[in-house]
Amino acid sequence: MSGPNTDYDPVEVTPLKAEQVETMRDAALAAIAAAADLDALKQVRLDHAGDRSPLALANREIGALPPQARKEAGQRVGQARGAVNKALAERTAVLEVEHEERMLVEETVDVTLPTERRRRGSRHPITLQSEHIADLFVAMGWEVAEGPLVEAEWLNFDALNLGPDHPARTMQDTFWTEPPEHHVVLRTHTSPVQARTMLTRTPPIYVVCPGRVFRTDEYDATHSPMFHQVEGLVVDEGITMAHLKGTLDHFATQLFGEGITTRFRPSYFPFTEPSAEVDLRCFVCRGASPAVASCRTCKGEGWIEWGGCGVVNPRVLTACGIDTDRYTGFAFGMGIDRTLMFRHGASDLRDFFEGDVRFSSAFGTEI
Amino acid sequence: MRVPLSWLREYVDLPDDLSTEDLAHRLTLLGLKLEALERPGHDISGPLVIGRVLTMEPEPQKNGKTINWCTVDVGDANGTGEPQGIVCGAHNFAPGDLVVVVLPGGVLPGGFEISARKTYGHVSAGMICSSRELGLGDDHDGIIVLPADAGKPGDDVFELLHLRDEVIEFEINPDRAYALSLRGVAREAALAVGDVDAFHDPAARTVPAPNGDGYPVLVEDPAGCPVFAARTVTGFDPSAPTPTWLSRRILLAGMRPISLAVDVTNYVMLELGQPIHGYDGDRLAGPIRVRRAQPGERVTTLDDVDRALDPEDLVIVDDSGPIGLAGVMGGATTELSGTTTHVVIEAAHWDPVSMFRTGKRHKLSSEAGKRNERGVDPTLPAIAADRVAELLTTYGGGTVHDGVTLVGEAPSREPIRTSLALPGVVAGFEISDGTAEESLLAIGAGLAIDGNGVEVTPPPWRPDLTDPFDLVEEVVRQVGYDVIPSVLPPAPSGRGLTRAQKLRRRVGRTLAGEGYVEVITFPFVGDQDLDALGLPADDERRTVLRLANPLSSEEPAMTTTLLPGLLKTVARNAGRGATSTALFEAASVTLPHGGGPAPIYGVDRRPTEGEIADLDKALPDQPLHLALTVSGEREQPGWWGEGRAASWADAVDAVRAVAEVLSVEVTVRAAKRAPWHPGRCAEILVGDVVLGHAGELHPRVCTAYGVPARTAAAEIDLDALLEHAVALVPAPTFSDYPVAKEDVALVVDDSVPAADVEAALRDGAGDLLESVRLFDVFTGDQIGAGKKSLAFALRFRAPDRTLKEGEAGAARDAAVAAAAERTGAVQRV
Ligand SMILES: [Zn+2]
């Protein structure tokens, strides 16, 4: 067959009869509706919409019709194929949703299974507490000063108005290094950092110094040859005890909460004059009444001994080259380990230094 | 300082409505801190009365003891007036003696309730009391036998025995030595009640003028002993008992009653604060001399210790040689004893520094020394000696000798020039001149006000007051520390944390994020710790700074490496069941460099820059180190499959992670260094400088420290690493053009480090190379013995265009050629 046959006999082609097209279409639609899953539907698509499907074959016959019959037959077959394709698309969408839902159900896992392949790390509570305290002061415009642990005797004692025969030197139970006549000690407090700061900076000075210190204390639940202190130092014009009180009240409130302030009691430290002990309002019972003898944190006193403070002794300023006519200062110091112990209810100081991973891990990475 | 209230009230009028708690609280706010408040005797309740023993029948018992079946007249105290039948185990009394009887219904210390009870075949209706049973001391000698004139049967004994009292224990700061006496505390109590006139000074007594007839005393060192008073009592009865009130007060004040003569010296010390020493006058040979000890001299002190004296020690000598450590402790040869009838009383003022040094040198702490080294009122010696003589003769008979020895006189005090406005200026709130003046007068200071301010002469009992600021504290504490306002000082805008401080925090957070737990260990180390690390004899880490007074002889030095402390912590955790741990510590180590002594400067001026530098030169280097360990399983097994054992690579990777957050480019190369496994140790470098090491520990080190096998560790100089931290990271530029990937497998000798092959590939690949990653290492028969195959993924990309066909391949070939040339690599195909 080549080219249109002009004398072609316009005979009716069987598959293009209306009822037959309808039958093909209905068969296709029924098969589509009956397809249970996407695989079945794929076969239905091949059977009823593929190149060799009855409707495709019928479509191919249209060309063989006499021109006057082609239009009607084309419309009829086209409509049927459109209906089949539409049904296929709809069925596909439905089956895809069904398939996805089934898949998701099948993929369900037990989300309560453990997930930790690698154990978590953590930082030491003393480090965290030191940083926390430093941040409180940095927020006020202070800076963080540091100094060596192995320190010159002059800086640890003499410069701080602790002369060679000062009774307070024995109170401090110092570790001396060999040979003792080299006058080198393990610093007994963080105060030499204050001396170093005054020797190297000019006022105004606003610094806080957290750090390790050493005393020859036997190691037990409340004593350790190594522990941590934080000291603060301010040297400026017109500095008073009121500024010291304001600073420590602010510190206490920041660390322990609103309403937790401090109380001063006269005391004695060689490097400050006047000197005071700082008591912290008990943050547990808040000193509600002296009757709360049951409070374990303050033992019913309503106050917790926190540290020492005072106006920097002018003798210390002089030794560090600060003009005492122009400047005054204040200083304070407290134990970081001790603060942690009562703030977090730790009962044994040794837990801080034994390195049991259960201890540090409990504090995570922020305090 | 323990202060019995009944005693205190003798020297200060306290309002009746002032509770003891309130008084203690007020004194605490003045600077005498309440340590404890005790109420001895308040747990005893009567009937507790005088009884007269009428009869006593000794009755031997089967247990070998003999008890006495007594009848005791207790007057009407038992309601019947009939004698009371009581069983008593003591034997130190006889019919007719007056004793102390607690009757049924009474309660003794410890809640011990007395009732009539059957014992040893009798109904014992009460108990005859010993001192111990009444909480009056540790006397084991038996029951209390009262003096014949103590009272009559049935009289209540609470008053008689001074059973009930209140005792406030104060913590006394070193600057308030005057408060180590009833006199000093009473003075403070008067301040506490706001009435200086309430104080009655026990030292206010007229004493006879000194004369030449007293016991001869020669003070050869007046600087060490500015004042020496001596009095003599003869005909003293050494068997005279100490009156109950006196021994009771000494006991409540925390000292042990011994004998009348000793008790009196202690009593006067507690009363006035002046330490007293009593000599047996008959055992003194010739005059008393005060001088420094001579080389080779020795003395046996009262505590029976034979002591070699130092030429700096102040000693008391007589013709026989040293007879006491002056002001600290007397000697045994002239001690007051049970036969002493001739008492020579010493009351002297000593140089506090000398006292302190002698006490420290001989490790001697005594009640006398404690006061003498803190500073005693130098006007007291004659007064105290007179008081002792009075009490000795009042209770022990005999006569006070007319001779009165007094050598030297109280040094005069330098007045302090200051201003009455200073207290308010320092305190930061209004304190009027009048208030300041009143407060200074109240502590006993003398004031001379002139146009330039005020000259304040501190009272003799306050050697601590030397500077204007000392006086400020005296004023402000009286005004009240509790009225100091709370004002935040206006700090200038600060610079925040330093870069190093911020970076150190970042390092800690990074390692915590990597699963490491931070620990803090002591920096003390011993030779056996360094031996356990396997350090060679010449290792620089064996050069340690030793402590002169270490707590433990096993750890006598400051450590040069953090690993011993960390490995002991690993072992401790493993011992407690945590065999898989990852730990880190950041701390300074101590590296001595043979610096000379640290100078000691004066304190009257700032040291020069050069002098400050000399201080630092004497100190060892103390770089901050970072060390870490990883043991057991780095990843745990679980439902997901196998765990993963920790290895050398974890330690290296942790160091790399730290370097990465600091933006420091580190390189790694093989090294041999203890305590690491010689084939599994990496040194970490920045440029050519080695900053530390990481890898698996030597198996012997694991054994020595008792840590899990194959524990890996790292230690680096963190300060040095921080110095290389990049301050300003330049923003990267990268290409959006397609990437070309080329994988190569290169066979090299086992000994060739992968890092060398990678470096050669990088160098050879040219500018188009974006990255190289080693993704597999393979050994086996196909490769050949002594060889390994390294598989690298190379990525190529041009910044400005899509690579042309063959370009990436050519670059790869160039890279492989470079690797072949430099490392002998052969490409596997
Ligand atoms: Zn509380």
Image (cartoon, coloured by chain):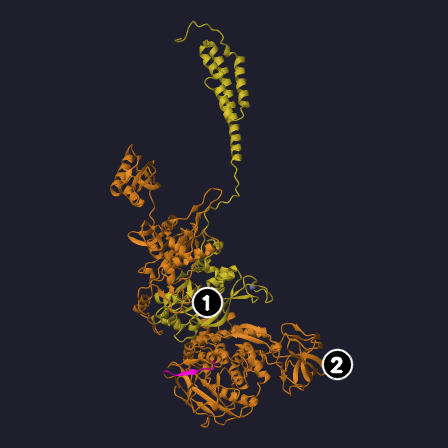
Chain colours: A yellow, B orange
In the drawing, does residue B759 fall left or right of residue B697? left
- Residue A257 makes an appearance in the image: no
Secondary element type, mark 1: loop
Q: Which residue is mark 2?
A: B80
User: Which residues, given as a range, are shown in magenta?
Assistant: B295-303
Q: Which residue is mark 1?
A: A218
- Give the residue type at disc 1: Glu
Q: Are marks 2 and 1 on the same chain?
A: no
Q: Position of residue B4 (x, y in %)?
A: 57, 78
Secondary element type, mark 2: loop
Q: Position of residue B136 (x, y in %)?
A: 60, 78
In this view, the residue in front, B238 or B799, is: B238
Report the chain holding disc 1.
A
Q: Is residue B182 above or below residue A318?
A: below
Q: Quadrant of ligand 1?
A: bottom right
Q: Position of residue B671 (x, y in %)?
A: 31, 51
Q: Main secondary structure of the magenta part?
A: loop
Q: Is residue B296 magenta?
A: yes
- Give the residue type at disc 2: Thr
